[in-house]
Image: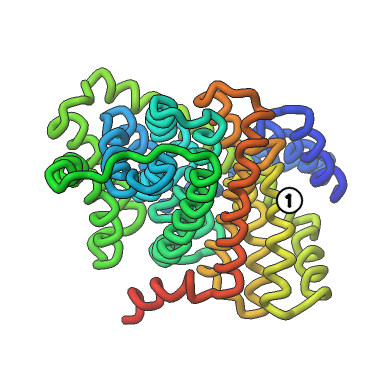
Amino acid sequence: MTYLITVGLIVLFFLGLPIAMSLGLIGLIAFFAEQGTQMNIPMIAQRMMYGINNFILLAVPLFILSARLMNTAGITTRLFNFATGLVGFLPGGLGHANCVGSLIFAGMSGAAVADAAGLGQVEIRAMDQAGYDREFSVAVTAASSTIGPIFPPSIPMVIYGLVGSVSVGRLFLGGVIPGILMTGALMIMVGAYAKKRNYPRTPFPTLRGLVIITLQALIPLMTPVILLGGIWTGWFTPTEAAAVAVAYALVLGTLVYRELSWKDVVQVFVESARDTAAIGFIVATACFYGWLLMRTGVPTAIAEGMLNVTRDPMGLLLIINCFLLVVGCFFETIVALLILGPILLQVTAQVGIDPVHFGVVMVLNLMIGLLTPPFGVVLFVMQQVGGLSFERVVRATAPFIVPLLVVLALITVFPPLVTWLPNLVYAN
C-alpha cells in the first residue's frame, strides 16, 4: 500500500497526467485496495468535501479575482511606471524596476503565476523596447515573480495556515521582511549583470515627473496598506481582506480609471471561476490522498526518521530545506503544502521550531521550485510570455536562483527575520 500510494503518484506525474487526476486516481486505487469488499463509497466524497469546506479557503478565489481585475484594468502598467521612476536611473534600470514592481504587485495578488503572466507582459515589453536581452528580461521576471507568495497577501500562506492551524495574519506579516530581502538580493544580481553587459538606465526623474507617476499609482499603492492595516487593526480577517481587495480593484477599474468595461468584468469572473475550480479540485483530491497517506503510517515514519537523524532545530531545518528543494522540482506548491505540511509540522513542533517561521521557510522553498525543471510552473508561463524555448528559459533563469537561496539561508538561520514583525504587531 505504501509503495502504491507514493511511487504510483510519482509515476503518474512523470507520465504527464494532471496533478488532480493523479492524486484522485491513486487515491481511489489505494482506497479500493484497502477497503476490499467492505467499501464505504460515501467516505470518498466526505473526505474530499472536508478538504474544501473551510472559510479560510475563500481567500484563494478572491485573491485570484483581485489579481485578474488589477491586470485587466491596466493597474499593472501604472505600478511598473512608478517602479521605473523610483529605481530606473540605476544601471540596468528596468531590471530593478521589474523587481520593485513585483514587490508592489505582490501586495495585491499573492500568486507567482499572476505576477509572471500579468505584470510580466508589461515588464518584458518595456525591456525589449529599451534594448535588453530577451533571456535576461525573462529571467528577472521569472525570479521576481516568486516574491508574490512571500510578501503579503499570499495564497500559499493561506493554504499553509489552513493545514497547520496557524494564524494567517501572522504568516502574512512574517513574509514582509523576507519579501523585501528577496527584492534587494535580486536587485544586486541585476546590478551585476548590468555592469557586465552595460545595460541602459532611464534618465533620473524630474520632481514633476516623479509626482505625476506617483499620483497615477497612488490609489493602487494603497491596496497593501488597506489590507495589512485592516488585518492588523482587526477590522477584517485575512479572508475578508481578500474580499476587500476584490471590491477595491473593481472600483478602481470601473469607476476611477474606467479601463474595465462590464464585459471585461464578466470575462474576468469567468476566468477566475475556472482557475478556482481547478485549484478546488486539486485541494479536494490532495486532502483525500493525504488522508489515505496518513493511514499508511508513512508520515509517522518520515517524522521519526528525521528526528532520529537530529533533534537540533537548525540541523533539522537544513535537512527539511534540502528535501523541499527537491520536492519543489516535482510537486505543485498547493499539493506540497497540503500533503507535506502536516507531516513536517509534526516534526518541527517536536523540536520547538516556530510554525510561522517554518511556514515562511517552507513557502520560499516551494517558490524556488517554481523556477526549477522539470515541472516549474513559472518556467512554462515565461516560455509562453517570453516566446522562448523551455531550455533557454531554464538556462537564463538558473543564475537568479542563487540570490533566492541566499535569502532562504538567511531566514532559516535567523528566525527573527520572519518572527520579529508578527510578534511585534500581535504583542498585545
Q: Residues within 10 Å of mark 1 (few under 14, many from 20)?
A: some
Q: Residue at x 63, y 46 (%)?
A: 399
Residue furthest to the top in view is 263
Closer to the camera in the image, 366 or 145: 145
Asked if residue 165 can be seen in this view, the reply is yes
Question: Horizontal and vertical percent for residue 322?
Answer: 73, 59
**Secondary structure beneath label 1:** helix
Please state the total of marks drawn on the protein image.
Answer: 1
- The C terminus - image quarter: bottom left
Find disc 1 in the rendering and name its residue: 326
Closer to the camera in the image, 1 or 326: 326
Q: Residue at x 33, y 48 (%)?
A: 87
Instruction: Specify the quadrant of the image occupied by residue 77.
Output: top left
Asked if residue 58 can be seen in this view, the reply is no
Question: Horizontal and vertical percent for residue 99?
Answer: 43, 46
Closer to the camera in the image, 100 or 160: 100
Decide: is 378 above or below 226: above
Left or right: 340, with 175 as reference point: right
Left or right: 297, with 402 as reference point: right
Decide: is 343 above or below 195: below
Closer to the camera in the image, 387 or 113: 387
Question: Horizontal and vertical percent for residue 402?
Answer: 62, 53
Q: Residue at x 60, y 69 (%)?
A: 412
Question: Horizontal and vertical percent for residue 17?
Answer: 71, 28
Amino acid under label 1?
Val
Q: Residue at x 67, y 77 (%)?
A: 313
Left or right: 310, with 417 as reference point: right
Decide: is 121 above or below 67: above
